[in-house]
Amino acid sequence: MKNLIEIIKEAEVNKIAIGHLNISDIAGLKAVFEAAYKLRLPVIIGVSEGEGDFIGRRQIAALVKSLKEEYNYPIFLNADHTKSLEKIKEAVEAGFDSVMFDGSNLSLEENIKKTKSIVGYVKSVNSEILVEGEIGYIKGSSTILKASEVFIKQEDLASSQEAKQFVKETNIDLLAPAVGNIHGIITRTSVDNQTQINAGNPNLDIRRIKEIKEAVGIPLVLHGGSGIKDEEILAAIDAGISIVHINTELRLAWRKALEEAFKEKPEEIVPYKLLPKAVEEIKKVVEKKLRLFNKINE
């Protein structure tokens, strides 16, 4: 079986992207794996610091490993938006395939210094574990947001010059630049006071993506893929994005599905009789996204 960097490199050549889907529970893992397996596409499971703390890093690593081994399948695990060496160490020791150190709230110099240190530690333990760094400021969180909560300024975005310096000095494997993307989905309240989900996230700076890709040469990662128009996702992939993160849309599918399940079975208390609806709704989102990233027609 090919390792993660080999699969990412193939995606680069073929101008497609690997889906990175975040999960918080076993229903999410089941949904993502079943959707990927149906399409026979590699997939990355992501857990943020909060998600990893809730599930347990050793526990999720064991579950992903069991799927990989039982099905001989290219499913990988990433420690997403990790902000401390302590949590990075937990992920490395648990057997994650990749880790992301998020130093985006630091100055460029401090981000370089800490990311370089993280790379040194990870590679000293296992040279095959990929390390991702982030530059620029990707606003929001993986929730439903109001337009007034997110305002992107030019200085929030990554530049090709900063990206080149960052990659050269840190030796990271993957780069997540701020290119107009946000975490979360923006809502808008209409005149009749009805909330519209996915009312329109900011546009991506496709030219900036292309310039950064040309400057750094390593695979680029697009965070905050939820809420971005399909045509922009495809343009970003053509410009140099090799991995796309989705989280908020999965959380929204989970929430809506469980609300429906409780309406349909108000007296039910058995989790495994309620959760299948969440699994099916998440699967629909995952399959749609994976088809998009891999340019597969319905």
Image: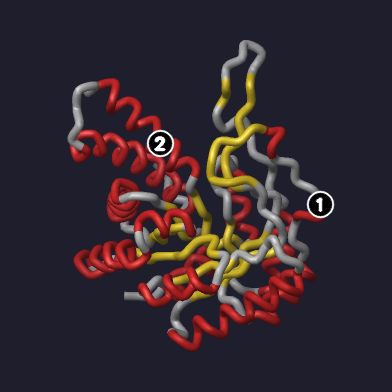
In this view, the residue farthest toward the top is 192
Q: Is residue 287 above or below residue 223?
A: above
Q: Is residue 110 left or right of residue 7?
A: right
Locate residue 74, reporting x and y percent.
33, 66
Query: Does the residue at mark 1 contact the one at mark 2 (Cβ under 8 Å)?
Result: no
Foreground of the two, 234 or 25: 25
Q: Is residue 223 left or right of residue 129?
A: right
Residue at 46 percent across and 65 percent down: it is 79
Look at the numbered disc 2 and give the secondary structure of its residue: helix
Q: Is residue 9 above or below residue 152?
A: below
Crowd class of label 1 (few under 14; some 14 to 19; many from 20; radius 10 Å): few
Dividing the image into 4 quarters, which one contains the N terminus? Answer: bottom left
Residue at 58 percent across and 46 percent down: it is 141
Look at the numbered disc 1 and give the secondary structure of its residue: helix
Colour scheme of this structure image?
Answer: secondary structure
In this view, the residue farthest toward the right is 154
Residue corresponding to mark 2: 253
Mark 2 belongs to which amino acid? Ala
Res 158 quadrant in image: bottom right
Crowd class of label 2 (few under 14; some 14 to 19; many from 20; radius 10 Å): many
Res 284 quadrant in image: top left
The Cα–Cα distance between marks 1 and 2, rounded to whole angstroms, is 32 Å
> Which numbered marker is on residue 154?
1
Mark 1 belongs to which amino acid? Gln
Foreground of the two, 114 or 212: 114
Locate residue 163, reporting x and y percent.
72, 70
Residue at 49 percent across and 49 percent down: it is 246
Locate residue 179, reporting x and y percent.
70, 54
